[in-house]
Image (spheres, rainbow, N blue to C red):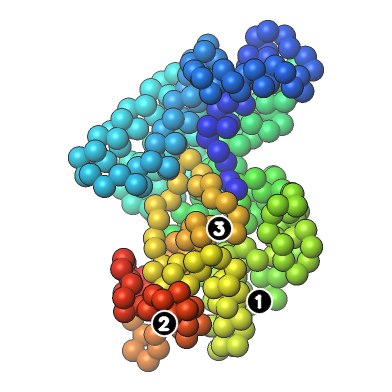
Amino acid sequence: MAFDPIQEDCLRLILEDMHRKGVFPLEDASFIEHGMELYRTDADQLVHTDRDRSFHLTARVAELVDYQLPFITNEMEINRQEDLAEDQLREAIELDPGNRDAQRMLAALNAESNDAYVSFLIDNRSALEDDLARLEAGANDPYSREFASDLGRRPYLRWLASLAAHALISGQYRIALEAAEASLAFAPHDPGDVRHSAMLALAKLEATRDELHAFRRKHALAYLSPSPQRRRGPLTGHRDLDPWSLLAEMSAAWKSYDLEGAERALRTLVKGFPHGAESLFYQAELPEGVFSRVNVPAASDDELVLAISEATPLLQEGIGSPDNACFSTWIANHDIVARALEGRGARPSQAKGRHSGGVD
């Protein structure tokens, strides 16, 4: 899922090394394998230019902020690492003023609010589109054409994915959906998983289950399974049971008082993940990845936790209503969840962690 910053850094550096040494064809397996080993042992061996160094720093910051910082508990250490990340991003931008990932990530770390970050992404989106046009126009050799066809397009996809995810958080659902649709039009196979943000935005825009299904049909390529190891649903080869789609369909059913349909989706989530009931009871909220959506294995507990966290705008529906419990409470306190927890010997009253009937 999503983009792996370390893998991408490795691929960029190997492609640049091929260009320097005139290696062709680009599918030279032995050269690539050797480059990957060099990267594993000492990546600095492959860093030769300011542009190389800039993205190398960016990848290191992404690894730190998205995959290490969330697990640090010491406040002083968190502050120290955040300062280090900002310094490295500033250095990356100085080395390569065209490093859009570093610019976006620094803006994410320094934004005064989520709305301010969304405004930054909207205001600077056209600059990335200009970058792409120049990149494609200047691709006049096999190496630059290879870069322009894939790696060079990824910063724009991450920009759109960040816009979709953060516009969703800030309640700008149509902007979120437009950004996701633009990304899917640009890269129909959806390497950044922006379709998940679109699914949640559609649910917030009161889409029916038929309309959610229509979105999946429209973007069938994004939902096609790339390998036999991926999730299997009712239609062989399709990722039909991803938790974002199920949460969106559950929300649509719940809002239309189709409790049978909502319960069917809830039961699928509980049964489809190793600790689905615990995840649905606690409803943990995770920080957004600054590089892109964080990588988690398909059909894993981590995938469900990530989907639930991103679905916070849906889970909050109904909060403050004097007559009905909010959606998050309906999920957490449902008999389907309670029975699954009891079957594991863990009753909600005994559970530890964050829970207040759903999302705070």
> Closer to us: mark 3 or mark 2?
3
Of mark 2 and mark 1, the one earlier in the sequence is 1
| Rendered image: mark on residue 333 | 2
Of mark 1 and mark 3, the one earlier in the sequence is 1
Mark pair 1, 3: CA separation: 25 Å
Mark pair 3, 2: CA separation: 22 Å
* Residue 164 in sight here: yes
Left or right of 18, for residue 13: left
| Rendered image: mark on residue 209 | 1
Residue 309 position in % (x across, y down): 44, 61
- Disc 1 to disc 3: CB gap under 8 Å: no
Q: Residue furthest top?
A: 21
The amino acid at mark 1 is Arg
Left or right of 124, for residue 156: right
Residue 9 position in % (x across, y down): 55, 27
Q: Residues within 10 Å of mark 1 (few under 14, many from 20)?
A: many
Q: Measuring 30% from the left and 44% from the top, which residue is drawn there?
A: 72
Mark pair 2, 1: CA separation: 23 Å
| Rendered image: mark on residue 300 | 3
The amino acid at mark 2 is Asn
